[in-house]
Image (tube, helix red, strand yellow):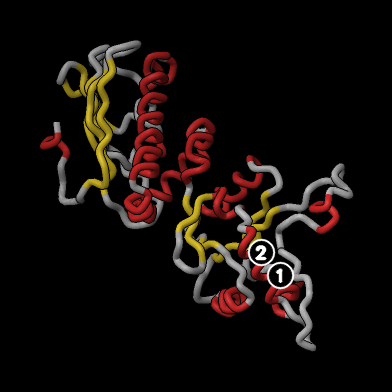
Amino acid sequence: YRKVFMDYKEPLFWIHLNVDYPFNLKGILYFPKQVNRLEVVPGQVKLYSNQVFVADNIKEVIPEFLLLLKGVIDCPDMPLNVSRSFLQNDGQVQKIAQHITKKVSDKLHQIFKNDRETYEKYWNDISAFIKFGCLKDDKFCEKMNDYILFKNLDGKYLTLPECLEIKPQDEEENKENAVDENGNKVEAEVVGDKSEDEASGENAGEEKKEKIIYYVTDEQQQSQYINMFKAAKMDAVILTHNIDQPFISQLEQKNEGIKFQRIDADVTDALKSKTS
């Protein structure tokens, strides 16, 4: 199969398909190296039935957000003359599409867990369509939730749980080093963390304060705010792709208590506690 679809773009990684039950399916798919933009390129995955070409660009078999994949699949149970209505209503076809989506998420999990450094190198090439997939497919979104990466102001990649993680040693260091204008030590407020009352449990029944993740949409235009954040030892993530806005809106809906806020939107109060 490989020589059928190899081209000048080096594959990032391969996905092998070999299923005997509840349907027959064999094939090889791969992610080509791309620029970091959302592109849905038609005709990349060719569908065969017993090595007889059926069609390509079949979004009922390959979900729309995975049409960036290249490769071939052979499904002997697939009729040679397929209509769009047949594909849309055939339960077997839907199972094939779900299986391919699962194999993709499983492969990404495997790479992340076994070689996170490589996964991070892939991220610029795969991030847009993964986010697109999360918007289109709830099951795919659930599986990928902890494997979405965000690049911070220092160029380090963090998962969503890592963005929300509070490191006690950093918090203590900030408290120890915080001083007022007379040089006296003061208790520094941690932005986005629980309030003092909530932390002490005095108002345990009250709603918890939102965790705020600040983000940058244009590094050049927002450079002044980035420098202010760095000076205040605060962090933000870089979200410059046009799909990022709907994506973070979805994250807020699916993750209660999380709020994404632009780095240049109403940060005066947030910075005050860090810079005073």
Camera-side residue of 191 and 89: 191
Whole-percent x, y for residue 273 in the image: 75, 73
Whole-percent x and y of residue 178?
72, 76
The quadrant of the picture occupied by the N terminus is top left
Residue lying furthest right: 202
| Residue in the image at 23% along x and 27% along y | 27
Image coordinates for residue 120, horizontal then vertical, percent: 38, 54
Task: Tell me the CA gap for discs 2 and 1.
Answer: 6 Å
Query: What residue type is disc 2 on?
Result: Glu
Which residue lies at the image location 51% right of the left edge and 50% below the top edge?
Answer: 159
Q: Residue furthest bottom?
A: 182
Between 10 and 150, the one nearer to me in the picture: 150
Q: Which residue is mark 2?
A: 171
* Local secondary structure at mark 1: helix
Tell me the quadrant of the picture where the C terminus can be found.
bottom right
State the count of labels: 2
**Residue tagged by mark 1?**
175
* Location of residue 40 by image quarter: top left
CB within 8 Å, label 2 to label 1: yes
In this view, 269 is above or below 115: below
- Near mark 1 (Cα within 10 A), the count class, few <14, some 14-19 or many ≥20, is some
Give coordinates of residue 5: x percent, y percent: 16, 38
Judge the density around disc 2: few (<14), some (14-19), many (≥20) Cα neighbours within 10 Å.
few
The kind of residue tagged 1 is: Lys
Q: Is residue 50 left or right of residue 86?
A: left
* The quarter of the displayed image where residue 236 is located: bottom right
Determine whether, in the image, residue 168 is placed left or right of residue 117: right
**Which residue: 25% across, 35% down?**
29
Please identify the quarter of the rendering in which residue 15 is found.
Answer: top left
Image check: 110 left or right of 171?
Answer: left
**Residue at disc 2, secondary structure:** helix
